[in-house]
Image (spheres, rainbow, N blue to C red):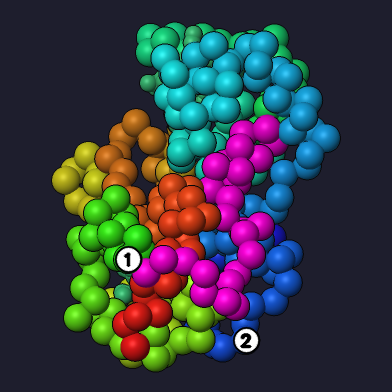
């Protein structure tokens, strides 16, 4: 299975998996769940990533920032091209040809091995930026519920989608603390009925030049092509410059939150959610 397949499969399968009590597992299993939740492939090769970091520092950091989170040039950690890259193949065309009209120079002299190393560095950055996986799930609640409530109503913008008296009422009675924590970090649907009502699977909507639209699960997106699996399971693809692409991910907010929480925020939110018995 290629990484693209894994990514799509991860979205499709993972969001459909029920979270049952006791499904906490080892930190490796947790890392895997976190990577899947974010649609990432296997962990980057650290040796290649280190070579890539040096190349990046010399050639790219000036525009994209030392951590690739953006400066003059865009944030590469949130770039769909980087997210959907496997081994440099979607990054390579951008790097080798550049986009001279838009301020991205070409690096035609980089070898494919060097592009691979750069890609591994970027994949590692994506994971590190979003990495809450090494974080220890709490069996003991140590956070401050008042601070958690303030975060919920304020910086976390949780009230845009949730209400403690509505959908989250009694949420703490439904899960043991470690599972409640997993559920707010990596929400997933639990019951098939809920899935039918309100799917959490990310969808891509493609607007064709004719004005017609097509939609399905994203297979791949790069500078030249976008492809999907449609509702009938058929593979369809279009040249990128002929269509408008819109990605709808009901859990986008949760995927973004993962890279924003401090450890204290996570403790505090859990303590607050625990008050919703
Ligand atoms: C002189 C500044 C500059 C340098 C140096 C530079 N970039 Fe860029 N890069 C840009 C700009 C600006 C864009 C956005 C172009 C656009 O708007 O389409 C970009 C876009 C990209 C993208 C596409 C992002 C996306 O999602 O569309 C990738 C990948 C990328 N750069 C990687 C690299 C790598 C790897 C290097 C080093 C080998 C590098 N860049 C060096 C300025 C730079
Ligand atoms: C843009 C919308 C959005 C925002 C913002 C958001 N969530 Fe969610 N959240 C969801 C969706 C969608 C789900 C999936 C389950 C569902 O539909 O309730 C979910 C699920 C959850 C669950 C699991 C509920 C259950 O019954 O299994 C918890 C707990 C949760 N979110 C907490 C939070 C917290 C805490 C924040 C803020 C730090 C937050 N959410 C911000 C959309 C959002």
Residue 31, quarter of picture = bottom right
Mark 1 = which residue? 146
In the image, 153 versus 126, the foreground residue is: 153
Residue 203, quarter of picture = bottom left
Report the residue that reaches farthest toward the right.
47
Query: Where residue 134 appears, x then y in whole percent?
Result: 66, 57
Residue 192, placed above or below residue 209? below
Residue 22's label in the rendered image is: 2
Question: What span is in magenta?
Answer: 120-145
- Residue at left offset 24%, top offset 46%: 207
- The residues bearing labels 2 and 1 have C-alpha atoms spaced at a distance of 28 Å
Query: Where residue 214 appears, x then y in whole percent?
Result: 29, 56
Is disc 2's CB within 8 Å of ligand 2?
A: no
Query: Where residue 49 appears, x then y in whole percent?
Result: 74, 33
- Please rate how many residues cluster around mark 2, counting C-alpha atoms within 10 Å: few if below 14, some from 14 to 19, many from 20: few
Tell me the element at label 2. Answer: loop
Residue 85 sits inside the magenta stretch = no
Position of 71 with respect to 147 (left or right) is right
């Amino acid at each position: 299975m290629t990484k693209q397949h894994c990514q799509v499969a991860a979205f499709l399968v993972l969001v459909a998996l029920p979270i049952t009590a006791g499904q906490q597992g080892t930190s490796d299993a947790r890392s895997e769940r976190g990577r899947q939740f974010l649609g990432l492939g296997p962990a980057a090769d650290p040796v290649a990533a280190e070579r890539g970091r040096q190349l990046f520092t010399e050639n790219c950091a000036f525009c994209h920032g030392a951590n690739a989170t953006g400066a003059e040039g865009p944030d590469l950690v949130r770039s769909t091209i980087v997210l959907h890259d496997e081994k440099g193949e979607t990054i390579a065309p951008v790097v080798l040809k550049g986009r001279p009209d838009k301020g991205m120079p070409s690096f035609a002299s980089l070898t494919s091995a060097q592009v691979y190393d750069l890609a591994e560095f970027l994949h590692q950055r994506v994971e590190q930026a979003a990495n809450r996986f090494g974080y220890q799930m709490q069996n003991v609640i140590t956070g401050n519920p008042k601070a958690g409530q303030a975060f919920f109503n304020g910086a976390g913008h949780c009230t845009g989608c949730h209400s403690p008296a509505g959908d989250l009422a009694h949420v703490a009675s439904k899960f043991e603390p470690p599972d409640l924590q997993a559920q707010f970090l990596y929400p997933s649907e639990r019951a098939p009925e809920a899935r039918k009502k309100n799917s959490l699977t990310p969808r891509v909507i493609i607007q064709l030049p004719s004005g017609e639209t097509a939609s399905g699960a994203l297979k791949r997106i790069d500078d030249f092509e976008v492809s999907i699996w449609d509702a009938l399971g058929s593979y369809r693809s279009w040249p990128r410059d002929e269509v408008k692409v819109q990605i709808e991910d009901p859990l986008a907010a949760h995927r973004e939150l993962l890279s924003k929480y401090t450890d204290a925020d996570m403790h505090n939110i859990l303590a607050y959610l625990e008050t919703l018995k």
